[in-house]
Amino acid sequence: MGTEQHGMTRRRLMTTAGAATVGVVAAGLPAGPAAAAPNDTHLLIGTPTSPAKLLHKLRQPNELWIPSPEWGDVYAVAKSPYPSGIVDVAGAMVGNQMHTVSAQHSQIAHAVRTEGGGWTVFNNISGFGAGNPAENRRVCAAGAAGNLHLAVLAWDGGVFHTIRKSADWLWTPLTRVPGWGSTNFTDIAAGGGSDGYFHLFALQGTQVLHRVRDPHTGIWSTPGSPGSATGSSGTAIAAGRAGNEVHAAVVTDAGLSHVVRYLSGSWSDVNLLQRIPDIDDVGAAGTPNGEFHVTIVGTESGVSGIQYWVKHRVRRADQSWTGFATLDFLRATRAAMAG
């Protein structure tokens, strides 16, 4: 698999868009935000509030966030499928559209942000052929050769996979990934490319696992691993394609680590990037110009008590990193990016 084109977009997912695009735009999500340019990145944040909220920002190549300092309220526009809570959320690009998946324990819903900035309503993917695992734990998605691939980590440890076909918007049935029918994974991440290869990552303890689905045969490769992240326990993993490289960000009790899969199929070391305690989740996305974006959500203790935060940083094409910039101090439990 060393010479295929890779592409990855984090946890983040896509599903059906059978309904017409919603023209109404919620407060804080400006009407007709700029159509997604090739190097734009999308950020999705899930909150534990009641009712739950799914928030969105678009980052342009000039480093401006839209809207700012507000957030777009996706559920207000695309009709919240789960007002009681969010188990996980994912985002991924298929062409010029950003697909969003919102998962609850027993349901998975999908909506699309169109090129013009409008949103379709959320639809339950089980009604479009996918079916649904008994209990959802984590979801991830990626575009591959114009189709949307979705993977689900169920509470029984099984990893499931389905494809949303762009030709008819229907889903293939969710089926267990061979060899991963029962696991002790804590999280999964996915990526795809124009060649149709779908890359699936999993976090087992602190070890990063990886395998590829061949688009011609549907056969999955034998699991491989670039190594383990620093720490004693792993929490979350996210990934994204930056140019022709695939990057992954890994959260453990030691902090945030980073690894690169090169076009040749070889790997960098899994390097500890920064020691940050109490990270709840990570989202990531790469862009065609070679940038890799990482967003983390978490908490820290201060003089006035617990403080919540959302932080973002970028690995530039020259391999240098920006520092973390705090985007907000809101409470969030889930993060996803798409680029």
Image: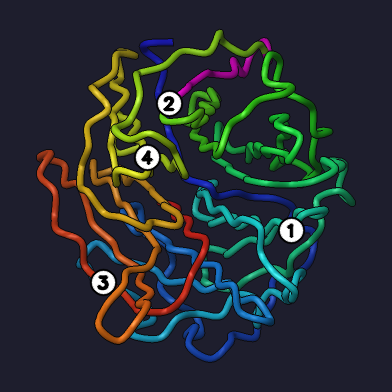
Q: Which of the 4 image quadrants contains residue 251? A: top left
Q: The disc labelled 3 sits on which kind of residue?
A: Thr
**Quadrant (top left/top right/bottom left/bottom right) for the N terminus:** top left
User: Is residue 199 rendered to the left or right of residue 127?
Assistant: left
333 left or right of 275? right
Residue pointed to by mark 1: 104
Counting residues from the start of the chain, the first of labels 1 and 4 encountered is 1
Secondary structure under tag 1 reads loop
Q: Which residue is mark 4?
A: 250
Is disc 2 surrounded by few (<14), some (14 to 19) or many (20+) residues within 10 Å?
many
Q: Position of residue 208 (x, y in %)?
A: 43, 26
Element type at marker 2?
strand
SS at circle 4: strand
Mark found first going from the N terminus, 3 or 4: 4
Residue 210's spot in the image, x, y percent? 48, 21
Here the colouring is rainbow
Marks 1/2: CA distance? 25 Å
User: Which region of the structure is painted magenta?
Assistant: 208-218
Residue position for label 3: 326
Q: Position of residue 132 (x, y in %)?
A: 84, 43
User: Disc 1 versus disc 3: distance between alpha carbons?
Assistant: 28 Å
